[in-house]
Amino acid sequence: MKVLKKIWWMPLVIYMTIIPSFVSDRVYNEICREIKISIVDSSQYRFITNANILSMIQDEKIEFLGHELNTINLEGIENLLLSVRELECAEAYTTADGVLHVDANQRDPVMRVITVFGNNYYIDKYGYVIPHRQIYTPRMIVVSGNIEVPDSCIMGKSILEEDDNLLVRKTFSLVEYISADEFWKRQIEQIWINDKKEIELVPRVGDHIVKFGEVGNYKWKFNVLRTFYNQIMPQAGWDKYDEIDMRFNGQLVCRKK
């Protein structure tokens, strides 16, 4: 009886051993017939297109169409795409139907910086600098004036790794706070850094400038400014003042037009 059981199991064992190997070899030797590129958040940001990615792969002389799947340099494709500052992550893989898949995620910018030298950059939520390109300009807070971006950050270092006292880092914290609050996100359109490296806020509603001063104690300043906007401005009128000054000793001083 035991012998019969062994004989009955042997074909099944052979099948389970040979068939996966056969399928694996077949997939391994499959020819690449197509490339599918997917930019996951392309509906939100358009820093880079499918055509850009395809051109990069072709320019790098990475062969894929008509070649066996196992010969495609997947790691080379991923490393190539990760060198693109606009992309946060990338993955290349193949499937048994002969398709090379390239998936990529773009960085999520939170602010645009126009430096004192006129250079344009975006900075993403992790503090990484993205070069400005003409292909697309998303709507976000613009920081301009007497501000610079360190060369180390332009070369790939996050501004969050820089000194806490660096102006662009402190301004980044300010923008994070604004972006996290729906009221301020709708109200603050631009941040101007004047010659004294003090902050001035340009609102969307109201024909005035907020002289915010230094970044320090910004949460308290925004609380005071919110109270002023909610309680005073509706009565006085949004166009009554041309300047709201918050630079000195916790005071809020308005200058009429």
Image (spheres, grey):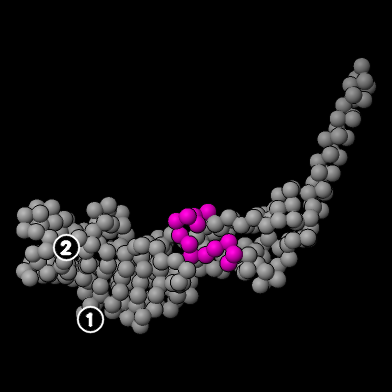
Give the label, 2 or 1, closer to the camera: 2
251 displayed left or right of 95 = left
Name which residue type carries label 1: Asp
Q: In the rendered image, is residue 78 in sight?
A: yes
Mark 2 and mark 1 residues within 8 Å of each other at the beta carbon: no
Q: Quadrant of residue 205?
A: bottom left
Q: In the rendered image, is residue 214 in sight?
A: no
Residue 9's spot in the image, x, y percent?
Answer: 87, 26
- Residue in the picture at 30% in, 62% down: 175
Q: Earlier in the sequence, mark 2 or mark 1?
A: 1
Q: Quadrant of residue 61?
A: bottom right
14 displayed left or right of 219 = right
Query: Is residue 195 shown above or below 161?
Result: below
Q: How many marks?
A: 2
Q: Quadrant of residue 101?
A: bottom right
Q: Which image quarter is the C terminus in?
A: bottom left
Residue 51: in magenta span: yes
* Residue 195: image tag: 1
State the SS at label 2: loop
Residue 75's spot in the image, x, y percent?
Answer: 66, 62
Name which residue type carries label 2: Gly
Q: Residues within 10 Å of mark 2 (few under 14, many from 20)?
A: some
- Residue in the picture at 92% in, 16% down: 1
Q: Which residues are magenta?
A: 40-52
Residue 71: in magenta span: no
Residue 120's spot in the image, x, y percent?
Answer: 39, 75
223 displayed left or right of 165 = left
State the SS at label 1: loop
Residue 252's spot in the image, x, y percent?
Answer: 9, 64
Q: CA distance from mark 2 to mark 1?
A: 24 Å
118 displayed left or right of 34 = left
> Dot 2 corresponds to which residue?
206
